[in-house]
Amino acid sequence: MQDKIVVSSFWATVLVVGTLLSPIVTILINRGFDLIAKHLNNKHERFVEFNTRRRQLFEQYLQALADAARATTPEERKNLKLMDLYYMLLPYLPDNMAESFNKCTLAAANGENTVQSQADFQTVIIHIKELLDPQGRKLIYSKQDKKWIWKRPSKVLGYFHKLLSKLK
């Protein structure tokens, strides 16, 4: 009889401890989830603000390029905000793209209208499209289709193609 009382008191103790601990564990789990969700939300807001600012700067830069193309007198060229916008864009540009932006900006500010300056402008436009693409794709010229196409970079596929080329 005493054994039954001891066993039932043991289970009663387990039940009481479980009843007391379950809300505490639930609160701790919920607070951990809230912290993670808050961190992800802050990270997303910073990402959206960064991309919004970058998009605005690119729009202003393209507007300044258009103003530079319309400027005909040296006085109009002196009042351009093109160089200011170029320097504001520099922190947002990858290193491999900064040189083409520099060439295009200098050509537009000096009023050059050569084949090379047009090619630099097209390169800048391609870079802007790549930077603003939300899927992280790259514009690649397809010699087979004779047009620009979007390609998604993939390390796995690149490795697979290299392996196939070695086997051939």
Image (cartoon, helix red, strand yellow):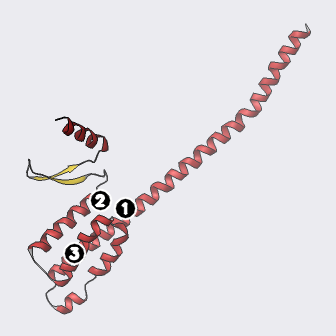
Asked if 72 appears above or below 135 in the picture, the reply is below
Please name which of the two marks, 3 or 2, marks the residue nearer to the observer.
3
Do the numbered discs 1 and 2 sit on residues whose CB atoms are within 8 Å? Answer: yes
Asked if 109 appears above or below 73 in the picture, the reply is above
Residue at image location 27% in from the left, 51% down from the top: 137
Local packing at callout 2 (Cα closer than 10 Å; few below 14, some 14-19, many 20+) is: some
Do the numbered discs 3 and 1 sit on residues whose CB atoms are within 8 Å? Answer: no
Residue annotated with mark 1 = 51
Q: What kind of residue is marked 1?
A: Asn
Residue at image location 18% in from the left, 53% down from the top: 140
Q: What kind of residue is marked 2?
A: Leu
Residue annotated with mark 3 = 103
Q: Is residue 114 left or right of residue 36?
A: left
The residue tagged with tag 3: helix, strand or loop? helix
Mark 3 or 2, nearer chain start: 3
Q: What kind of residue is marked 3?
A: Lys
Mark 1 or 2, nearer chain start: 1
Local packing at callout 3 (Cα closer than 10 Å; few below 14, some 14-19, many 20+) is: some
Separation of marks 1 and 2 at Cα, in angstroms? 8 Å
Q: Quadrant of residue 57?
A: bottom left
Q: Position of residue 72 (x, y in %)?
A: 13, 87
Residue at image location 23% in from the left, 70% down from the top: 100
Residue annotated with mark 2 = 132
The residue tagged with tag 1: helix, strand or loop? helix
Q: Position of residue 5 (x, y in %)?
A: 88, 13
**Residue found at the very far top of the displayed protein:** 1
Q: Is residue 35 left or right of residue 22?
A: left
Q: Quadrant of the N terminus?
A: top right
Q: Quadrant of residue 68?
A: bottom left
Asked if 88 appears above or below 16 in the picture, the reply is below
